[in-house]
Amino acid sequence: MSVFHPVELLLQWIYRFEEPNVVRDRPMQVLALGLSRCGTESLKSALEDLGYRGVYHGFEVQPDQCMVWTRLWDAKAAGSERKICMEDFDKLIGNYEAITDAPGSIFGRELIEAYPDAKVILNRRKDVEAWDRSFRSTLIKGLRDKWYLKALSIFSPDYFWLRQITLRYVIDFFNGSFEKHGLEVYRAHYRQLEDVMGEREYLEWTVEDGW
């Protein structure tokens, strides 16, 4: 993606994985790009019930994929001149027809541009304050409480890369502090996606809307 800092190259050598290299075998059909705690698991179940073959969710993420997702985020955050494109995503999720939840949601703009024919769902919470409380009590609390994962990440490539992409999502994505910037980033996330969509149709959905 870009020229890596020597420390990044060293970490990828120490915690080495054979990178996934999936060849897309079905079209990407649905991009559900709302943030975590916005009905992402319900959407996964609903889309599977509707017959979509493979719905990629945060629960599906494998350690070797975490390494690549982390690299893509770092390139995006650094403003790499090389755009993240369909080929990058296909190597990770080429055998899925839909995607929801993190880490996909932090690449909303890139996914929209990579799959111009896919349907887009902007799933969100009507009560933003409730979303804030839910995020804090699950993802933020879990990151802090699971101190043993931090210890394990020193010795295990699996836990190392899982922790890296988790840190990118719950800290870096929120400008370094969810407590300070969570609501601001939440609102900016949806504004950006609405701007990117332009005249392209999309479904705005909340869990409260039902099915």
Image (spheres, rainbow, N blue to C red):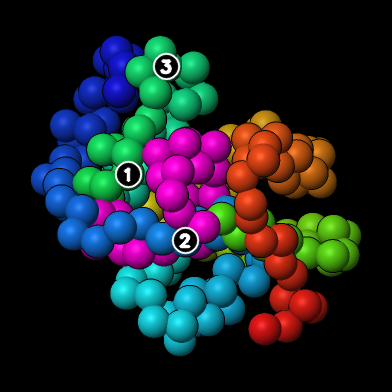
Q: What segment is highlighted magenta in the picture?
A: 93-119
Please give the name of the residue rendered at 77% of the width and 77% of the height, measured from the top-left corner.
209
Q: Is residue 114 within the magenta segment?
A: yes
* Other-residue count near label 1 (Cα within 10 Å), few / some / many at <14 / 14–19 / ≥20: many
In the image, is 67 to the left or to the right of 77? left
Circle 2: element type: strand
The residue at which mark 1 appears reads as 89
**Identity, as a three-letter code, of the amino acid under mark 1:** Phe
Q: Is residue 56 visible?
A: no
In front of the other: 163 or 75: 75
Give the label, 1 or 3, closer to the camera: 1
Q: Which numbered disc, 1 or 2, marks the residue that appears first in the sequence?
A: 2
Q: Residue 196 placed where, x, y %?
A: 63, 35
Q: Which mark is residue 30?
A: 2
Q: Residue 128 placed where, x, y %?
A: 85, 58
**Identity, as a three-letter code, of the amino acid under mark 2:** Val
